[in-house]
Image (cartoon, coloured by chain):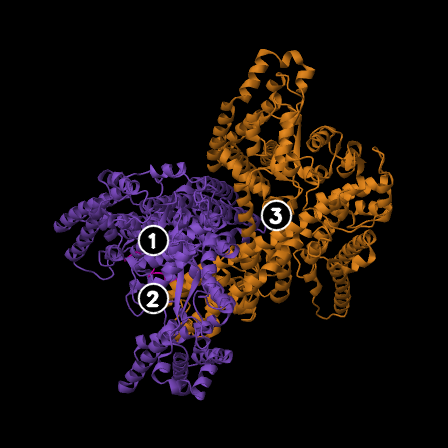
Chain colours: A orange, B purple
Amino acid sequence: MSPAEKGDGTANPTPAENSTINGGNTSEKQSKTELELQLAAAYVSDAQYNRNVCFEKTPQGIRLYNLYNHWGMLLVTYFFIILDLALAVFEDPALIPLPLWATFLAELICLAVFTGRLVHFAKVIPWQKFWKDTKNICVVLIILLTLVDMLIYGSMKAFGYYGVRWSRVLRPLFLVNITEGRQVRRAFRSIRNTLPEILYVFLLFIFSILIFSLMALKLFGKRKLVTNEGTPYFTSYLDIVFELYVLVTTANSPDVMMPAYNSSFFFALFFILYILINTYIFMYVFLAVVYNNYRKHLKEEMKNLVRAKRHKMVEAFRILQVKHGGEPVVCQSHWNQLVRLVQPDISNSHRELLWSVCDEDKKGFIGKVAFLQLADLLNIQIITLKSHIHPLQTWFPHLYNSHPSRLVCQMVQHKAFVYVYDFIIVVNAVFIGLDEENPLISNAEWAFLVLYMLEILLKLYTYDPRSFFSRHKFWNWFDTIIIIAALVATTVNFALKSSDGYTSRQVLDIVFILRVLRLIRIVDSVKRFRTIINTLIKIGPTIITFGQLIIVVYYIFAVVGMEIFKDKIKFFAPDSTASAQNYCGNPLLKDTAFAQNNYCRNNFNDIVSSFVLLLELTVVNQWHACALLTSGFTTVTHTAARIFFVLFHIVVVIIIMNILVAFILEAFFVEYTLAKSDLQTSVEKKIQELELGIQQDKLDETLVGNMETHENELGPSELSKGKPTLMFKIASKRYRTVDALLQRIFEDDLSPEDSGSSSEDHEGDPDNPLSPGFNFQNPSFDGIN
Amino acid sequence: MSPAEKGDGTANPTPAENSTINGGNTSEKQSKTELELQLAAAYVSDAQYNRNVCFEKTPQGIRLYNLYNHWGMLLVTYFFIILDLALAVFEDPALIPLPLWATFLAELICLAVFTGRLVHFAKVIPWQKFWKDTKNICVVLIILLTLVDMLIYGSMKAFGYYGVRWSRVLRPLFLVNITEGRQVRRAFRSIRNTLPEILYVFLLFIFSILIFSLMALKLFGKRKLVTNEGTPYFTSYLDIVFELYVLVTTANSPDVMMPAYNSSFFFALFFILYILINTYIFMYVFLAVVYNNYRKHLKEEMKNLVRAKRHKMVEAFRILQVKHGGEPVVCQSHWNQLVRLVQPDISNSHRELLWSVCDEDKKGFIGKVAFLQLADLLNIQIITLKSHIHPLQTWFPHLYNSHPSRLVCQMVQHKAFVYVYDFIIVVNAVFIGLDEENPLISNAEWAFLVLYMLEILLKLYTYDPRSFFSRHKFWNWFDTIIIIAALVATTVNFALKSSDGYTSRQVLDIVFILRVLRLIRIVDSVKRFRTIINTLIKIGPTIITFGQLIIVVYYIFAVVGMEIFKDKIKFFAPDSTASAQNYCGNPLLKDTAFAQNNYCRNNFNDIVSSFVLLLELTVVNQWHACALLTSGFTTVTHTAARIFFVLFHIVVVIIIMNILVAFILEAFFVEYTLAKSDLQTSVEKKIQELELGIQQDKLDETLVGNMETHENELGPSELSKGKPTLMFKIASKRYRTVDALLQRIFEDDLSPEDSGSSSEDHEGDPDNPLSPGFNFQNPSFDGIN
């Protein structure tokens, strides 16, 4: 054992393990106990998914831990979280009112599940660690507070008092504080870390608004100008501050400047200067500050994650290692058992490929450095392509190999086939645009359906159905589902129409949507479009993290908004004859722009309306109608209600949206500048070496897109060339987990001592398994989990 | 001569120079002719300012070239360009109408100046090079076309026909195509290079809009919904496309979705999906694509610039070199003459400092590598602080050094002094906010003025007036000017009021603005605010480049807009009684939202109105009122006028604004991550060594801000410590030229062979003046100038 490795060994030594390892030092083939393999597998799995849970190292503990991480358990947890959140739909103010006992019962079940999950977690990790973890304390607190609130609210209701279900605000926090919410937690941590820097810019920005408002008050206050609504223009300081804040979001431009501009040309200068400074400079500076800080903090977090990952892999290695010629190594049989435990669904051939990447020299065992990359290797998505023989060829070999049949196959594989169908799609688009009540047009729809069906059938005839419908062939699945659904919907519609002459509007809507969706396929024909879409899909998983974050914020604002504003504004169906319709059921709104613009449906009367309204406020990123909305809401409540909207703007638009932009910029930057990782390259090299790869020209195609097009199927023509029937390829630069992508982003920025065991070293110098920078003495995980 | 250097020598050998250099190889002190020094100075100056003009190497040529680059000539050129652009104010449709002969005369004078400048340039560079340069051909073409247009327009007018002054569109191109417009040209080149990548995203974006529009047509077209104005909702495909395009800019949200949302909840989903995909994803992808491409292309350009700069410096070295022990070197006397020629206003001490940085070992001569950094050294802004003795001390030494006087000085230097005045400013802000017609308040204004004057006088008493008003003390200048102006304005106002009781509104406005501006000074008291503002000021010069770019685009759109839309919409003063006021003088606009919102002044009737309108369209980044504006304009002209507005949006918002964001992000990124350059560090080290620096604690303060605060003046207290009376410091990370900043941004990305002669090599290994990567064989300058 080299001194460096001994340093690792002392990191967290369990006496039982140490004795096992040190005891049998001389034998080359040591059998590892089931426990050891299970433990190592748990470590590798944790490293692969960047989990960082300090579970108990007993057979019982590992079994419980594996159960805890089982996808079924996760599914159940997320189901109940969604149920819990969805309760807002049924609770007062409800979209679909349910009796109180029903929602209470549902909520109690949810709480029971969360408690169960927490108890499970408490059994997995040591007791004192459990209570040191803020997220567990949070969950316990939320559950307790919710119970208290339910008790109070229930008894208030029972005695007919008015109660507020304030604990609903806490619900989205479950999403953050469950063990699996680590990405959401990290996003929140990013925001928290960015806040101090933003704060100063924000204060300067507010200062600038205050100064400009003061100037506006002095310049315009005494001029007796009136706004378009006839109210005095710029006379109250607080109103000016609010108006100018809204101007930053450009929502009330140019309305807010028109009275002044109408009175003199030169006043336009004031507003131009204001907009340049506050809308442009400050907003861009916000973005720049957020971007830089986000990047900086993310880098730190990723460094810690990588360190933790390596630490876990070292632990796993330490458990599995045997001595071979004085060097600690892991032999193939243990490695195989380990991989089977970590990823039971992995194919044998895939596993062998990974082994051959690790064991370059076919020695039958691998050193520490080669072992450490296992977690990353498992995270590389490798697609196994089995080139089956077409079933028709098996069943009717004579017929399938006949000349006309081959001609059909060649026709389908020809490029012109694609062009013809692109043309058909364009023609179809024109037909869709025309009036469908013309019988010619509606009959043409049948012709198009037949053409599309024919295309799918021809392709199924030419290519093997199993590879046509393999998991990663997005467009094939898309096509088939859309066409079959359209066929069904059109038939139903036709049947309804011919039976009683009545056309169901809903069915027609579905038919129309499906028809238009068919047109999207044309995007797949242009390579550059495919590239853009693939990039978008690659950054998709992380966007989901942001989605959760936004849902948390939205939910909190929606619940608070509902309590404050519910039923202040009422919506009447357009065909209603109630006179209250003209002022949204609130006399205060009579003759306001809010009512005149028919904005009554933008209200906080139920959770769905609230979400739509908040989305409008976000999306109209620059608030557009918020001025109207806010004036609507502040008219019916109080001017202080503006605080709610300004706060929402600051939280969502200034902070969260900028972080989203920061992430997209960063992700695109990586996509544009980085090539594949070294590990991926070495896997690819190995695939090439073993002659298991798809030919290079096909490969190029494939690297562009991980969603296959019809051009690179494995058709029967390739089968005849005597190629191996099993092929691998790397699913482009896609990663299994979001963390893996994020780590990839900052991989190049990691300091040398962190990447001391990276694969390059290993490839260039396989005799130096332990690089000097390999020290894991108590890495600080405080901030990670 | 080493082979590498011979390679350089053959790059552009003039026989005359070669003979001079090779002739006197053995003597150590060779006197250089005036021509040689002039030539070398021209090269160094070109390298310093990144000029890349191939001037003639005759005494006459160099003199002409120096004259061409003289700042006076530049000033004249820019004055006439601004005059030429400003002519639009006086031409029909005019803000201030002038007779045709007057504008024609002014334009002819401008053209004459531009022609003269071009002829001058033609004399500087070889004839064939002149005609190879597109920018010269452009200028010639623009001048000719303008003359033709003036001739046609003049004769048309003379015979009473209607004419269009189409050549006005070409005017802003002068700004781009003059020799000094190289930064604007580079920005345009960046845009041109980014276009192909943007194009594909844009096409996909348009495709997405078309598909969504088709779906909207099918879903809503037959439902007989009506908009708020009572017109049919979503029935014409082209209207839908336009509406949805505007929705991307979020201008008409939520109006455009309200009819559908009012009819059913589920239709909100359609709009939410649309907004997520098109407003969020595509707009962010635009930004990401622009950012990445901009960065990539800028890097390329900067690499070329650095290569060209080094090439010029090598040329200069080749001219000045003498042999010393077999090594080509430049001796101090030549170097001094050179620096004096390049920068005549440099102080002797500053020059000696630079020399001591180059000549580390005080050998009296420097090698090639040390010489090459001269251009960069000259670009580092070094502030020479002369610590004068306070004039009062000279005149009344006894009085000034007396105990009360010292006490006053100590008081002013105390931190509390700053806090007291910060408090006074806050109190003043409150007083400003109160009603100034209250006599108490208006009298308090005098008290504040006296307090501020007192502050300035006390500071002048304590600190030396010459250092108080030195060039880089921004806040001192700001304070003094604002206070004195406020004093004058308030006195004038008071005099006017007391003489005839009449208060001039204009004077009052100025008084108010000055009062509020005084409050800004408080920003200077918070260190973090100062940092942010300094960063903004540092990226300021480059923003000016973008300003020019935006003016070019605006001007073209404004001129075209004026021709299309002039006098379609008329503005009547608010107190006018014309009934036409209600519909902007155009019966077509009766009862439209445009007229109702009082938008009549948003028109294209003169160049200033056009600029304000275009700024509204830009600034309301997301167009807000554009929907209204566009509908206003399209009502009075034709629906095709929408093309004008969409085009403007694409050019300005999607392309130019994104590039601006890209630049700001990049600049902030550099400010956050990079430390000072090695060269700056070595200059600073030298300053420290020579004990000419300000003490470290002062230096820290200084590095934070290049705008001095009152805290780091050189007060009399320091003088008494027997410090040298001359001190240097580096003006933070500021650079003299924008190019220098840009080069700095990408400095670290430059490949090793490009930085083969960077200062690190020199410092680490002064015996190796010629690094191997030093090859300048015909660098490709095609793209640079």
Q: Secondary structure at mark 3?
A: loop
Q: CA separation, marks 1 and 2? A: 62 Å
Q: Secondary structure at mark 1?
A: helix
Q: Which residue is mark 1?
A: B335
Q: Secondary structure at mark 2?
A: helix
Q: Residues within 10 Å of mark 1 (few under 14, many from 20)?
A: many
Residue B155 disc label: none
- The reply to whether the magenta stretch includes residue A108 is no
- The reply to whether the magenta stretch includes residue B605 is yes
Do labels 3 and 2 touch, CB within 8 Å? no
Name the side, left or right, on which A582 lies relative to A64: left
Q: Nearer the viewer, residue B373 or B210?
A: B373
Where is residue A494? Give x, y as percent: 58, 34
Q: CA separation, marks 3 and 1? A: 44 Å
Relative vertical location of residue B124 with respect to residue A486 in this rendering, above or below = below
Picture quadrant of residue A711: top right
Callout 3 and callout 2 share a chain: yes
Where is residue B260? Give x, y as percent: 53, 50
Q: Which residue is mark 3?
A: A750
Q: CA separation, marks 3 and 2? A: 58 Å
The quadrant of the image that shows the N terminus of chain B is top left
Whether residue B628 is visible to the viewer of this picture, yes or no, is: no
State how many labels appear. 3
Q: Chain of mark 2?
A: A
The quadrant of the image that shows the C terminus of chain B is top left
Relative vertical location of residue A388 with respect to residue A538 in this rendering, above or below = above
Q: Chain of mark 1?
A: B
| Amino acid bearing label 1 | Trp
Where is residue B215? Give x, y as percent: 51, 42
Where is residue A758? Give x, y as percent: 65, 41
| Amino acid bearing label 3 | Leu
Q: What's drawn in magenta, residue-wise? A: B597-606
